[in-house]
Amino acid sequence: MAESTEKVDTIVAESEEKAIEKTEEETEEVVDGEVEEEEETPEKSAKANCCYVGNLSWGVTSEDLSAHMASTGCSVVKADVLRQNGNGRSKGCGLVEFASEEDASKAILTLNDTDLMGRSIFVREDREEKKSGAGRTKAVGSTNKGASPSAEAPTGGSGRRLYVGNLAYSVKWQTLKDFFRQAGNVVYAEVMTEANGRSKGCGIVEFETAEEAEEAKKLTDTELNGRGIFVREDRETPKSHGGSSGTSVYIGNLSYETSWQDLKDHMRAAGNVDKADIITGSDGRSRGCGVVIYQKPQEAARAIRELHNSTLNGRPIFVREDREQGGSGGGYRSNKSGKSKGCQLFVQNLSYDTTWRDLKDHFRQCGDVEHVDVLEYPDGRKKGCGTVRFYQAEDAKEALETLDGVELMGRDLAIKIDHKA
């Protein structure tokens, strides 16, 4: 009897041990399953599958966009052309979701700057996370196509940053950086581009020290890719004052029909927009300008570089840093104050072929140009004269001294201070 009892006890004990081991194994499997589930949260992976597509022709449909984005073998899950509320008109941009992160990366590499219905589109990762409840959107980092990937956007250290003009359109950031390394250690180089990725013929170079930047100024009039470049101190460094710390930009020349949502959708091509406002008069009508606040100063700087002179609702807008950081406190003040005296020039003897863009590009070699007008008669014929307004009076003075009598498009310019400004 004693032996039988011992055998029963042994069997029971072994059964209990096996049951415990099985329970532990099941628990580990559940824990492992939970870990794997957490790693594959859709919210973490879905964002990497999405791309933002800009500079779309107004006639492009979601079907057209989907077909184009799949043309290089990328698997498209969904494609949407963003449209205005109410009238349903295209905003000239769209979002595309791919089956995998690899497909999204391939689309950026193979389809950026390709032609879709007569326009060169640009394709980049979608930087604006979808909102969850009342939460704010998350910024997703990116690299500017025209900039050195080895450094963040330039900080504009005192005397270390230079503006380089008259670049050949074939010059890339690496060519620019290699060329300026003869003067010192280049920590950042960028070729400025239009919204469609095309070079603007100018760039930024930042050195490690102010002494190296000073040495680089001696490269003015030297040749790079067949063109004589000019080099000067970069005076357009984004400011970092006020509550927004350089994240706010001012947008002018807006169509009166442009809504804050239109503005936000257009400006998010440069980064994650926290807020977009259309500035209005006391009657509530648009003044044709607005303010956009980004989450990061780098995004605001990118907007100034990439979206200035881009087209929104049929008009080329201008974008610059917001000097009043959000335009709050009783409305946005005009630049026409006592401080702007001597900043505007009157330019005569212009060729009738000269556009405002030609005029602005010509005067930018002397400083940061705020606004340019080529004057016209009521019937649209040009008067052969115009105005150029600088942000700084000393830049206007330099332009007067160095460009008066200089040829632009076959004619010698006559320049004087515009006392009527």
Image (cartoon, rainbow, N blue to C red):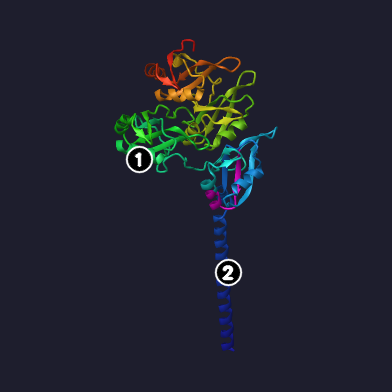
48, 231: nearer the viewer: 231
Q: Amino acid at mark 2?
A: Thr
User: Where is residue 228 shown, x and y percent of the image?
Assistant: 37, 30
Distance of label 2 from label 1 (alpha carbons): 65 Å
Residue reaching furthest to the front: 410
In this rendering, position of residue 264 left or right of residue 205: right
Disc 2 secondary structure class: helix
Residue 178 tag number: 1
Q: Measured from the top left, where is residue 385 in percent x and y?
A: 49, 15
Question: How many residues crowd around disc 2 within 10 Å: few (fewer than 14), some, or many (20 or more)?
Answer: few
Residue 184 visible in image: no
Q: Are marks 2 and 1 in contact (CB under 8 Å)?
A: no
Q: Nearer the viewer, residue 129 or 33?
A: 129
Quarter of the rendering occupied by the N terminus: bottom right
Query: Considering depth in this image, is 388 or 31 the residue closer to the camera?
Result: 388
Q: Residues within 10 Å of mark 1 (few under 14, many from 20)?
A: few
| Residue 98 part of the magenta segment | yes
Q: Which stretch is magenta?
A: 93-106
Residue 154 point in image, percent of width and height: 41, 35
| Three-letter amino acid code at the position of disc 1 | Asp
Residue that carries the numbered disc 2 in the rendered image: 23
**Within the image, what quadrant is residue 37 found in?**
bottom right
Question: Residue 43's spot in the image, x, y percent?
Answer: 58, 49
Q: Residue at x 58, y 73 (%)?
A: 19
Residue 89 tag number: none
Q: Earlier in the sequence, mark 2 or mark 1?
A: 2
